[in-house]
Image (tube, grey):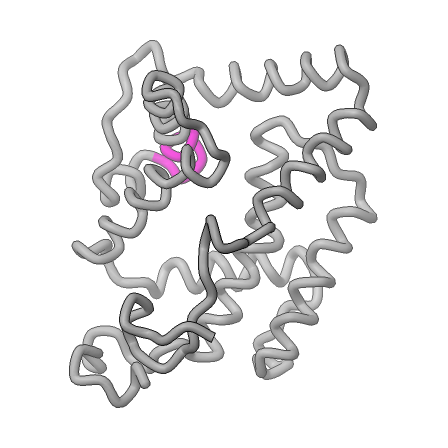
């Protein structure tokens, strides 16, 4: 549908949802996500890290990514990410809008209702995102600039997570994190709704 849509700019964007972009995506959702999680203070042993990559590699295989461009290791995933990132066009109004809306949606995803807490969560998310993505990409996405005193946000956050994990016990923290993931994954009539992929705009797609 995207390929046939008049709204799709083939000259600027190429083939919609190509195997190359899928390969890029799974490298981000696997190896890159693990790397960012570790920087934020999470702990994974080598087997857990390999498991994440194996799950996403299988997902990529099922989605039709040719094995010639399907990563086989963490090193492969890093290489694919680095090459793909260099080939991506500069941020435009669409990517800027999506990047900012994703961050602003975080309070709703974790069900934070208090206005002050919502703003604090969004502010923290912007600071951590800038620290993880780097100044150039964060600026391209028009994320809020950070002051000199905010440059240690990532280190402070990581130190806090490690302290809390030591205080509560590693297994208890892991169990709590897993429970949170399950809660976020539960979609019901009160949350996100599934729609048939019968229109290029999700809002215009019909329900199941």
Vertical order, 117 against 106 (above or below): above
Q: Quadrant of residue 187?
A: bottom right
Residue plotted at (29% across, 40% down): 136
| Rendered location of residue 64, percent (x, y) | 58, 83
Which residues are drawn in magenta? 128-134
Q: How many marks?
A: 0
| Left or right, 194 with reference to 55 | left
Residue plotted at (23% across, 49% down): 96
Q: Nearer the viewer, residue 5 or 69?
A: 5
Q: Nearer the viewer, residue 2 or 157?
A: 2
Question: Is residue 131 one of those drawn in magenta?
Answer: yes
Q: Nearer the viewer, residue 5 or 206?
A: 206
Q: Quadrant of residue 175?
A: top right
> Chief secondary structure of the magenta span?
helix
Q: Nearer the viewer, residue 40 or 71?
A: 40
| Rendered location of residue 44, percent (x, y) | 75, 38
| Rendered location of residue 160, percent (x, y) | 60, 14
| Left or right, 193 with reference to 12 | right
| Left or right, 34 with reference to 140 | right
| Rendered location of residue 207, percent (x, y) | 41, 72
- The quadrant the N terminus occupies is bottom left
Vertical order, 122 against 137 (above or below): above
Residue plotted at (54% across, 54% down): 188
Residue plotted at (63% across, 27% down): 41
Q: Residue furthest bottom?
A: 4
Vertical order, 80 against 66 (above or below): above
């Amino acid at each position: 549908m995207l390929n046939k849509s008049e709204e799709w700019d083939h000259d600027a964007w190429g083939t919609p949802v190509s195997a190359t972009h899928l390969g890029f995506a799974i490298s981000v959702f696997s190896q890159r996500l693990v790397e960012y999680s570790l920087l934020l203070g999470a702990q994974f042993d080598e087997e857990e890290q390999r498991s994440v990559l194996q799950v996403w590699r299988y997902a990529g295989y099922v989605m039709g990514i040719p094995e010639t461009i399907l990563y086989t290791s963490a090193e492969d995933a890093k290489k694919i990410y680095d090459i793909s990132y260099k080939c991506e066009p500069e941020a435009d109004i669409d990517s800027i809008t999506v990047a900012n809306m994703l961050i602003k949606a975080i309070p709703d995803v974790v069900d934070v209702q208090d206005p002050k807490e919502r703003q604090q969560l969004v502010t923290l998310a912007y600071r951590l995102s800038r620290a993880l993505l780097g100044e150039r990409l964060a600026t391209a996405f028009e994320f809020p600039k950070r002051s000199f005193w905010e440059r240690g946000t990532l280190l402070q956050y990581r130190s806090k997570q490690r302290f809390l994990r030591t205080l509560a016990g590693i297994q208890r923290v892991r169990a709590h994190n897993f429970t949170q993931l399950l809660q976020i994954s539960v979609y019901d009539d009160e949350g996100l709704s599934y729609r048939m992929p019968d229109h290029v705009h999700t809002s215009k797609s019909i329900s199941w």
